[in-house]
Image (cartoon, rainbow, N blue to C red):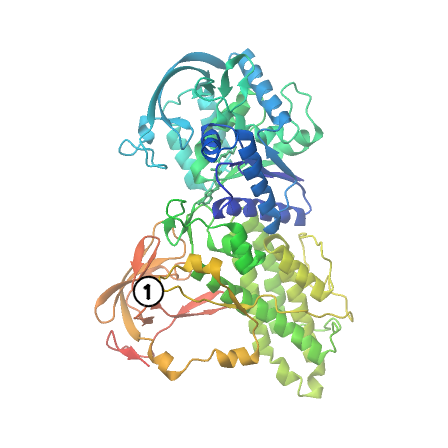
Amino acid sequence: MNTYITTPIFYVNAEPHLGHAYTTIIADTYSRFSKLCGKNVRFQTGTDEHGDKIDEAAQKSGYTPKEYADRISGMFRDTWPGLSIEYDNFIRTTDENHKAVVRGVLQKLYDKGDIFFSDYTGLYCQGCERFLTDKELVDGLCPDHLKAPEEIKEKNYFFKMSKYQQWLIDHIKSHPDFISPVGYKNEVLSFLSEPLADLCISRPVSRLTWGIPLPFDETFVTYVWFDALINYLSGLGYSPSGDHGPDFTTFWPDAEHIVAKDILKPHAIFWPTMLKAMDVLPYKKLHVHGYWNVNETKMSKSIGNVIRPQQLVDDFGVDTVRYFLLREMSFGVDASFSTDAIVARQNSDLANDLGNLVSRTMAMVKKFTGGKIPPKPQKVEDLDQKLIEAAESMLDDFIDSMEAFLFHRAIQSVWELIGLANKYIVENEPWALAKDPAKRGRLEEVIYNLLEVLRIISLPLHAIMPQTAAKMAHALNVESNPHLTGGPVWSTGLQVGSEVSLQEALFPRLEMKKDTDGGAVQQASKSKSKKKISDTDKTDSLMSFEQFKQFDLRVATISAAERIAKSERLLKLTVMAPEERTIVAGIAEHYAPEDVVGKQVIIVANLKPAKLMGVESHGMVLAAKDSGKLFLSTVSAPVAPGTKVS
Ligand code: MSP
């Protein structure tokens, strides 16, 4: 089985940022996952270097376009290893081979009669580098760049895209997984319900020279999108003459592209019709994700809130960054980055849940079984059976979710098992077993089971957090390059009697120091305060009564609840405490709106208001999380709304 996974090739007019990193981490995670499943994988990324935007940026900075492209392309290439991204091919559209393939394709379509010369008047958006239709404008402006497009009249070459419109509609309808998530597929089908215009694929040299000259008319260069999309083939050894390299034959039938919603149309409409015209099989899948905002605001250079991936890695470590991005965004829907959110994930999911499970287990091995893996248990008690079944089904759920590109769900299934394993420790009370020599056998069983569950947890982590998975594999003395095969895996990997040890805690707890202006994101890049969890730290971090008195905890009655559009996690609650206020609570995955109306909950009433998915929240609802499930806090009998909790 093969997989060919690609990212968009990024424009070299801007340095790599969080959005580019997200797509590329997704591609890397999927590539690692496919390898874990035993597939033969090719992963391609690269840079898109021609066109107006690059020409303009180069001119502004005093470089030639090629010098400029070399510099920024180098930055992309240098950024990826720091994020544990391992691609197989990095393509540049200025590569000679790519240019030759583009010219070959143009000639082929020209000879076939699918390219024609005509007058054109259109509304051109510099930002999008394409002509927009009237329907796409909002109040006369490009909705993505908030600028009025320029009216341009000129003679140009066109690709007969309209000729393939019906074929494309039929193909999308008969291949349900062609474009996903389904919302984007519907968006494309709705766009295709109107007649499709032919695609202008040239720019006159009088207006732009930084591009690939058309083979049949050198007074024109190729439109940057027509040039860029072909990277997916040229990087794979495709040849317009039919004399393809072996990778094309092997991988193209399994091509899966990952893009964000901003470039849905070129990928869902231009590209498949171009492939059809070229007599090349359509790609297999297009995966479309949402946009990362920063503190609920669009990320932009002019606002000054652009997040640089390298800075994040310096502040939080590569695996925390990968985990956060994959866990926080529901694939397909927009998400918001904030330093508070990444710190919270590190402290709760990584340091508390995973980190504690690993360090507690390893500490028990050291203390109770001489640092060695105890023998395989001869019997299975009910609690063990529950753990074994959960471990086996976690792997099935993980694989299903990963194949569906539901990365956050895949991670949730791993964390449910982590929660259960932490509970298994509490329920079995190993420290009590250790006090009774008659229970030595049971103690060893519990420790063996915990080590085995750690091994199984480390398997999917090889795709998500490669460094952490490698540390776990090393600590457990197991295979560092494992496979995720179907079928039972329990008790198949540990070497009984071998020495195991953990060098250092996997994830330290982080403390957040707030800027006076609350600039949390700037803060992340300026300071980091990493703390190892130790007993002294635990005492240091106890709060005084004075600090506790600052919490205004109240009983609130929920009078209304509704889902927040585009968020799987959030419910908008109207609560009485005693006056009415709105609270946005991250409980939608656990409670339906109708289940919470009428409930009394405990809230933190004096939190600074914060906007979540555009809704201002005035307070926080308290809840307990156990084995991945959320339980709302409440009082034991009804009290007046607004009653203080102390
Ligand atoms: N060069 C074209 C793509 C050609 S592919 C044949 C291009 N380049 S780009 O540099 O603008 O990259 C766009 C892509 O970067 C998005 O589709 C997405 O993958 C990523 N992102 C850029 N900003 C983003 C966010 N704010 N959030 C998430 N991803 C975003 O378009």
Look at 54% across and 18% down and name the residue there.
Answer: 213
Task: Name the residue furthest left.
Answer: 579
Q: Is residue 410 visible?
A: no
Is 295 above or below relative to 171? Answer: below
Where does residue 339 sit, x and y in percent of width and height? 45, 59
Name the kind of residue labelled 1 in the image. Val
Q: Position of residue 454 (x, y in %)?
A: 64, 65
Which quarter of the rendering shows the N terminus? Answer: top right
Residue 464 point in image, percent of width and height: 59, 54
Q: In the image, what residue occupies the spot 47% across and 35% down?
A: 61
Rendered view: 24 above or below 419: above
Taking the image as shown, residue 365 lies to the left or right of residue 344, namely: right
Quick one: quadrant of the C terminus?
Answer: bottom left
Q: Position of residue 146 (x, y in %)?
A: 32, 36
Q: Residue furthest front?
A: 62
Residue ID at (55%, 35%):
47
Q: Visible in this render: residue 451?
A: yes
Question: Compared with residue 267, is residue 500 higher up or lower down, i.e. above or below?
Answer: below
Quarter residue 387 falls in: bottom right
Secondary structure beneath disc 1? helix
At 54% across and 64% down in the image, what residue appears? 350
- Closest to the observer, 224 or 558: 224
532 left or right, relative to 516: right
Residue toward you, 88 or 392: 88
The one of 2 and 103 positioned closer to us in this rendering: 103
Q: Neighbour class for label 1 at 10 Å: few (<14), some, many (≥20)?
A: some
Q: Nearer the viewer, residue 401 or 472?
A: 472
Q: Which residue carries the number 1 mark?
A: 596
Q: Is residue 355 left or right of residue 617?
A: right
Which quadrant would residue 123 be assigned to in this image?
top left
Residue 262, quarter of the rendered image:
top left
